[in-house]
Image (tube, rainbow, N blue to C red):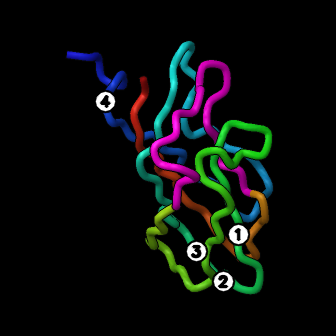
């Protein structure tokens, strides 16, 4: 039987992401000689206050444009605290080399809000 996290579906997550700031946050750490096959992803909005006018836009990946796991994801202005937003993946299945660089969530466009934080969950198989 394989060790936990190898040839097994596992969930990685990054909590406390400020969706009002342009930044990258690591979700899946680099693992030498490994590939990651994403199977599902979602955003859990943990705190939303006065979110209007400008929607946050995210993307997931480890390439130069952070979009090889999931391209641009617009966070709708209608979502509230504790909303779950499914994140469509770029391709399924697509193996992403995490040997040298892990997978990050990139806030490509900052949302306009008093408070806007969330947790990105990314499930997949490490091979």
Q: Which quadrant of the figure contains the C terminus?
A: top left
For the residues labelled 1 and 3, say whether their Cβ atoms are less than 8 Å apart.
no
Image vertical order of residue 61 relative to residue 18, above or below: above
Question: Which tag is nearer the camera, tag 4 or tag 1?
Answer: 4
Q: Nearer the viewer, mark 2 or mark 4?
A: 4
User: Mark 3 sits on what residue?
Assistant: 48
Q: Earlier in the sequence, mark 2 or mark 1?
A: 2
CA gap between label 1 and label 3 equals 12 Å
Mark 3 or mark 4, whichever is nearer to me: 4
- Residue on which the image places disc 4: 8
Q: Which residues are magenta?
A: 88-107
The answer to which of marks 2 and 4 sits earlier in the sequence is 4
Instruction: Say whether disc 1 or disc 3 marks the residue closer to the N-terminus.
Output: 3
Give how far across and how far down residue 41 sits, in percent: 47, 53
Mark 3 or mark 4: whose residue is earlier in sequence: 4
Foreground residue among 126 and 15: 126
Please name the residue that numbered disc 1 is placed on.
56
Q: Along the line of sight, which residue is nearer the eye, 20 or 127?
A: 127
Residue 106 located within the stretch drawn in magenta: yes
Residue at image point 55% right, 69% down:
47
- Counting residues from the start of the chain, the first of labels 4 and 1 encountered is 4
What residue sits 44% from the left and 68% below the top? Answer: 84
């Amino acid at each position: 039987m394989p060790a936990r996290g190898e040839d097994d579906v596992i969930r990685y997550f990054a909590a406390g992401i400020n969706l009002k700031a342009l930044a990258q946050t690591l979700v899946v750490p680099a693992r030498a000689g490994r590939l990651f096959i994403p199977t599902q992803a979602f955003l859990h909005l943990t705190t939303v206050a006065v979110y209007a006018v400008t929607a946050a836009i995210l993307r997931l990946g480890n390439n130069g444009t952070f979009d090889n796991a999931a391209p641009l994801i617009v966070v709708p202005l209608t979502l509230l605290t504790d909303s779950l937003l499914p994140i469509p993946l770029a391709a399924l299945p697509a193996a992403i080399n995490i040997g040298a660089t892990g997978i990050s969530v990139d806030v490509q466009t900052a949302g306009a809000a008093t408070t806007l934080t969330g947790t990105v969950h990314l499930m997949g198989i490490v091979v």
